[in-house]
């Protein structure tokens, strides 16, 4: 595999390392809480990211949100939190309030939550090409998994990006499972990064449970793209420790023993050990980080509980910038015939 | 002629038509400016639809710095139909560029360009090549404005050389209007003349919503008057191409010219037909349908696409909802058949021809309540 030069280790100072841990704790606690919210009936469903905190926080931390743009799937809560998306507005998608979430994707530079597997990978290429045309120095990062890498759009996106030298980072979270199908039944050759050679795209396969390694790899890939060298691929090897969603039952396709054996070391524990070993954090720091995460989750939960359904007229309001007469007629009929007059 | 045409009138008309149809290659003429219902202003030029579309694209790129043209072979070659001829030379490779040969990629990339503030004008080389892009067209182009609560509009004008009539290989002649018209978030339009093509393309490219622009490829090389000034031109809704009293023919794209031929032939037998060029297939101008059929009390809708769940069904429903009390007969549909688009040798058997349209007219005029 081609090398991505210019990895910039210097950008992670001691305080950055502590911040990466705080972010991972916040994400972990919110993620686990969201499963409880679903069990309590507060939200109808959720797609947990347990075990992928390092991949998401590390990659998100490497972005420059003054000029970059994120193209997520439906499992990038950790990235959203890291780049500063309002988490009530983000989690509203899991409350079935609005498909894409309630946050402003243009202002946050975080594209609407995308339920179509690999749906937004090509969008990242188009957006990135626009940065070339405009000379902004911005780069796109597009997230997808080992399962999505089977989609034809991923091939088209990588090929387009390489041909056009578009500044885009393809960030794959290879979490071992596409719902019930393991990577070896999904990805021929066992690695998405290995495909990069065929496109002439440099790639990095990185330990996705090591938040520092992920942040550094992503920063290197972004630097490569910004410098006008075209796209880069980062494959973060991680593990989906939880179910695909709150409707999934992993017991039907993997044993607990296999799960424990394959999951490897918990990314939070790893970072905790790292901070302790470097003398950057003590017990008080970890307690404080957890307390902050709990307080944050409490605020988000209250926000989600307070969130009512959107007015029904919004079904009609956002279909077009310039609604058709037929749609206006339908909205009028709905108003007259429903209880929402 | 009285209110109803007589059977002998119709038989005579059909005889005339059959001989006319047999010589279609030689008799197919573009109606003069007046007959196409368009003002031939003092500045009108004679252009083919290909030239009119090329002129429109050039002016769009000139006026709108965010407009970009992309697709397969649209650069140096100028597109397989030469619609983008010379544009890359004039505006550079940043504004007019070739993509790899993958339609989902073209449309997905257009979505990203639109998210970055561009106004993409992608070309899908032939209608049948839109199928690999349907996921992006339906799930992304059509929904991004909605998904983003209006924050990420999709001002994409998707040009699709459409319909049949050029003896092309398989999936080079398809009529996808019903598929696209069914998708929330999309708008669909099809021009019937060079003048319409010029103005409708400029209008579509100026709007903030995605428009599927279906170009009738069999009309690319037919010439007609184009008045680029046309200050009174209205790009929205349907347009009456020919006024008549007895029956309304509803059509779009290449079928408009054919319906005008039918109307001229029928006129020789005293049947006075109104021809309505629907233009916009989404939104359909229901008021124009009601106004025309409210007057003529009879309607035949003509399209190249298969019958079942075709747009003719939507047109018939809209007419029936608005004109049920005054209709003299059920709305008739003269369409392609529920078959895959046939090979060139059978193309003329598939596309509604003058005879089949006249038979449809006859069924409506002869209809009696049972």
Image (cartoon, coloured by chain):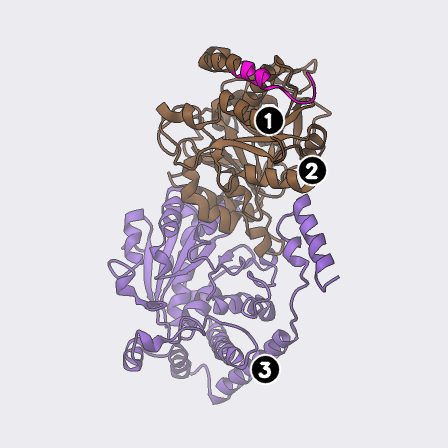
Chain colours: A purple, B brown
Q: Under tag 2, what secondary structure?
A: helix
Residue on which disc 3 sits: A295
Magenta range is B1-14
Q: Under tag 3, what secondary structure?
A: helix
Image quadrant holding the N terminus of chain B, namely top right
Q: Nearer the viewer, residue B295 or B109?
A: B295
Query: In this rendering, is residue B45 above or below B346?
Result: above
Do badges 2 and 1 share one subunit?
yes
Residue at 57% over, 31% down = B301
Residue at 68% over, 63% down = A311
Regarding residue A322, the answer to whether it shows in the image is: no
Q: Which mark is residue B366?
A: 1
Residue on which disc 2 sits: B323
For marks 2 and 1, give the CA distance: 19 Å
Do badges 2 and 3 share one subunit?
no
- Mark 2 against mark 3, which lies toward the viewer? 2
- Chain for mark 2? B
10 Å neighbourhood of mark 2: few (<14), some, or many (≥20)? many
Query: In this rendering, is residue B51 above or below A324?
Result: above
For marks 1 and 3, give the CA distance: 79 Å
Regarding residue B123, the answer to whether it shows in the image is: yes
């Amino acid at each position: 595999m081609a090398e991505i030069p210019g990895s910039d280790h210097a950008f992670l100072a001691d305080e950055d390392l502590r911040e990466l841990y705080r972010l991972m704790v916040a994400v972990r606690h919110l993620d686990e809480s969201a499963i409880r919210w679903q069990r309590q009936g507060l939200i109808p469903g959720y797609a947990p990211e347990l075990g992928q905190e390092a991949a998401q926080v590390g990659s998100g931390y490497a972005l420059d949100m003054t000029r970059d743009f994120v193209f997520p799937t439906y499992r990038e809560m950790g990235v959203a939190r890291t780049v500063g998306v309002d988490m009530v507005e983000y989690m509203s998608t899991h409350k079935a309030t609005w498909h894409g979430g309630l946050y402003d994707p243009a202002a946050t530079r975080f594209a609407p939550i995308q339920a179509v597997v690999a749906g937004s990978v090509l969008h990242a290429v188009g957006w990135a090409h626009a940065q070339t045309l405009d000379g902004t120095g911005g780069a796109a990062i597009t997230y997808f998994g080992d399962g999505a890498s089977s989609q034809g759009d991923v091939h088209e996106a990588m090929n387009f990006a390489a041909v056009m030298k578009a500044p885009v980072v393809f960030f794959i979270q290879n979490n071992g499972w596409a719902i019930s199908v393991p990577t070896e039944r999904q990805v021929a050759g066992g690695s998405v990064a290995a495909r990069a050679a065929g496109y002439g795209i440099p790639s990095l396969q990185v330990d996705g449970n090591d938040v520092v390694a992920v942040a550094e790899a992503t920063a290197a890939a972004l630097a490569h793209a910004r410098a006008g060298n075209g796209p880069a691929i980062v494959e973060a090897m991680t593990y989906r420790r939880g179910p695909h969603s709150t409707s999934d039952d992993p017991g039907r396709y993997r044993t607990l023993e296999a799960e424990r054996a394959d999951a490897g070391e918990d990314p939070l524990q790893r970072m905790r050990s790292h901070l302790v070993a470097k003398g950057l954090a003590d017990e008080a720091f970890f307690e404080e980080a957890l307390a902050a995460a709990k307080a944050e989750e409490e605020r988000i939960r209250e926000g989600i509980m307070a969130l009512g359904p959107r007015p029904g007229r919004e079904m009609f309001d956002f279909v077009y910038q310039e609604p058709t007469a037929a749609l206006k007629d339908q909205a009028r009929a709905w108003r007259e015939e429903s209880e929402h007059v | 002629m009285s209110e109803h045409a007589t059977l002998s009138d119709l038989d005579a008309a059909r005889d005339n038509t059959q001989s006319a149809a047999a010589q279609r290659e030689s008799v197919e003429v573009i109606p003069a400016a007046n007959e196409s219902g368009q003002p031939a202003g003092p500045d009108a030029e004679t252009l083919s639809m290909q030239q009119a579309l090329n002129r429109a694209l050039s002016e769009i790129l000139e006026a709108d710095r965010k407009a970009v043209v992309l697709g397969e072979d649209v650069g140096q070659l100028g597109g397989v139909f030469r619609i983008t001829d010379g544009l890359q030379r004039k505006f550079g490779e940043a504004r007019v560029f070739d993509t790899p040969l993958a339609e989902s990629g073209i449309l997905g990339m257009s979505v990203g360009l639109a998210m970055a503030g561009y106004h993409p004008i992608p070309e899908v080389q032939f209608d049948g090549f839109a199928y690999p892009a349907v996921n992006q067209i339906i799930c992304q182009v059509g929904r991004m404005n909605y998904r983003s609560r209006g924050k990420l509009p999709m001002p994409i004008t998707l040009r699709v050389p459409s319909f049949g009539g050029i003896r092309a290989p398989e999936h080079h002649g398809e009529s996808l209007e019903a598929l696209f018209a069914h998708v929330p978030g999309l708008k669909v339009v099809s021009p019937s003349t060079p003048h319409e093509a010029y103005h409708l393309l400029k209008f579509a490219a100026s709007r903030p919503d995605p428009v599927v622009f279906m170009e009738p490829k069999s009309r690319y090389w037919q010439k007609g008057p184009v008045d680029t000034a046309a200050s009174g031109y209205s790009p929205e809704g349907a347009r009456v191409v020919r006024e008549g009293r007895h029956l309304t023919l509803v059509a779009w794209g290449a079928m408009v010219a054919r319906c005008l031929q039918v109307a001229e032939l029928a006129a020789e037998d005293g049947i006075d037909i109104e021809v309505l060029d629907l233009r916009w297939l989404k939104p359909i101008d229901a008021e124009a349908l009601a106004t025309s059929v409210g007057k003529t009390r009879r309607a035949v809708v003509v399209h190249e696409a298969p019958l079942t769940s075709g747009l003719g069904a939507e047109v018939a429903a809209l007419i029936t909802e608005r004109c049920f009390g005054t209709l003299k007969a059920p709305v008739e549909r003269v369409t392609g058949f529920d078959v895959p688009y046939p090979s060139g040798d059978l193309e003329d058997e598939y596309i509604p021809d003058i005879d089949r349209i006249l038979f449809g007219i006859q069924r409506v005029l002869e209809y009696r309540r049972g």
